[in-house]
């Protein structure tokens, strides 16, 4: 009995320790919760022919100089187009003092899509035209058509608005047409007049908008300004104001444009500070705004093109492919929520 007991005890202990040391593989359980995948959104195709017709329509009104019938008629049409495309639209009217003492009756035209959406992006352009052709050799005191300088940016954004009405984005989109941008003082020469002394005579509509916000607590994620975006072979460098206030956005937009095949327009060149509507919005509000503007950094008085502020700024220089490139990039920004 004793021997049997010991043998049983030995075998029991052996079995016990064998069980204790046996490694058992336990399947791992992944408790990580996967985030829902973001639905794929197809960016609509920008219609460059439609954008071109929008530019033509503005030019057909005549020069859009404040205090003129052509200006007021065009303003009414712009507001009606935004309404037609489903934007809640307001017209901010005001009076601003020009460099020459003229009091200008200006109109900032503002359209909002998905008005109740908190996450918003702003797009803007100026819609007025230069009241004189100060860089021309003839008819210097007559206003210009402003097909590129004014109408091109507005034409692109009107087509963007039309596309939005057809394929609704999830973001809130604001389109603002600023007035009285191009009524600035004449630069006689680089030596005869200090440029800084005339800077604030430009962009009167956007300055008025900054000082008198028409929308309480307006705070979009960012803004993109389009100016002179219709000329053939246009190039858009990265200007210093845009880089300073929204350098990350500049790089994202330019990279996206280059990936889309528009690197011949959106060039990796740096430009100095350009006084434009985005300058005052950046300086006077908390909204980071970049400028897409035709500018040759190494030019000599022809930096904005030889047609700039001359009577040559007419429909002959407007290029559908340029309008199409800029417009397609803007739609990419909206629908891919850049």
Image (spheres, rainbow, N blue to C red):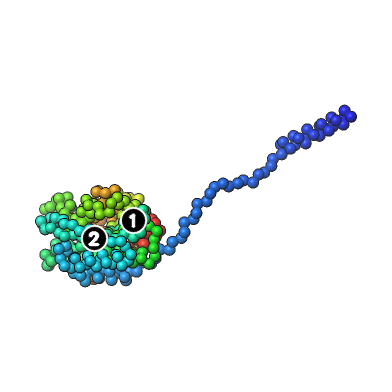
Residue positioned most to the top: 2
Q: Which residue is mark 1?
A: 121
Percent of width and height locating residue 294 = 26, 60
Percent of width and height locating residue 104 = 15, 59
Give left or right: position of 336 versus 136.
right
Residues packed near mark 2 inside 10 Å, few (<14), some (14 to 19) or many (20 plus)? some
Percent of width and height locating residue 196 = 17, 50
Q: Quadrant of residue 230?
A: bottom left
Residue at 24% x, 68% y: name it. 77
Q: CA distance from mark 1 to mark 2?
A: 19 Å
Residue positioned most to the left: 101
Residue 76 shows which numbered tag? none
Residue at 84% x, 29% y: name it. 6
Q: Can see residue 307?
A: no
Residue at 67% x, 44% y: name it. 25
Tell which of 101 and 310 is nearer to you: 101
Check disc 1 and report its element: helix, strand or loop: strand
Residue at 16% x, 62% y: name it. 66
Label 1 or label 2, whichever lies nearer to me, is 2
Q: Which residue is mark 2?
A: 91
């Amino acid at each position: 009995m004793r021997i049997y007991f010991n043998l049983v005890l030995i075998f029991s202990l052996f079995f016990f320790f064998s069980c204790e040391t046996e490694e058992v593989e336990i399947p791992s359980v992944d408790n990580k919760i996967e985030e829902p995948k973001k639905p794929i959104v197809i960016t609509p195709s920008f219609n460059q022919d439609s954008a071109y017709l929008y530019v033509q329509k503005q030019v057909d009104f005549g020069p859009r100089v404040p205090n003129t019938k052509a200006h007021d008629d065009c303003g009414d049409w712009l507001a009606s187009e935004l309404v037609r495309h489903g934007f809640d639209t307001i017209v901010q009217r005001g009076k601003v003092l020009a460099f020459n003492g003229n009091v200008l009756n200006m109109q900032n035209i503002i359209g909002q899509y998905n008005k109740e959406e908190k996450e918003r992006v702003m797009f803007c352009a100026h819609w007025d035209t230069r009241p004189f052709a100060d860089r021309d050799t003839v008819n210097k005191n007559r206003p210009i058509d402003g097909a590129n300088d004014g109408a091109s940016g507005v034409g692109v954004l009107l087509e963007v608005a039309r596309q939005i009405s057809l394929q609704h984005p999830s973001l809130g989109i604001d389109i603002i047409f600023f007035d009285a941008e191009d009524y600035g003082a004449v630069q006689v020469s680089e030596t005869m007049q200090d440029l800084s002394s005339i800077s604030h005579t430009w962009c009167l509509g956007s300055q008025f908008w900054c000082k008198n916000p028409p929308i309480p607590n307006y705070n979009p994620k960012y803004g993109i300004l389009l100016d002179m975006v219709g000329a053939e072979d246009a190039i858009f460098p990265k200007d210093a104001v845009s880089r300073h206030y929204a350098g990350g956005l500049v790089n994202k937009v330019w990279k996206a444009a280059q990936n889309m095949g528009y690197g011949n327009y959106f060039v990796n060149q740096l430009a100095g500070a350009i006084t434009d509507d985005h300058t005052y919005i950046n300086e006077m509000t908390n909204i980071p705004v970049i400028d897409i503007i035709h500018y040759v950094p190494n030019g000599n008085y022809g930096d904005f093109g030889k047609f700039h502020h001359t009577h040559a700024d007419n429909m002959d220089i407007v290029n559908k492919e340029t309008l199409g490139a800029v417009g397609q990039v803007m739609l990419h920004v909206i629908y891919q929520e850049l």
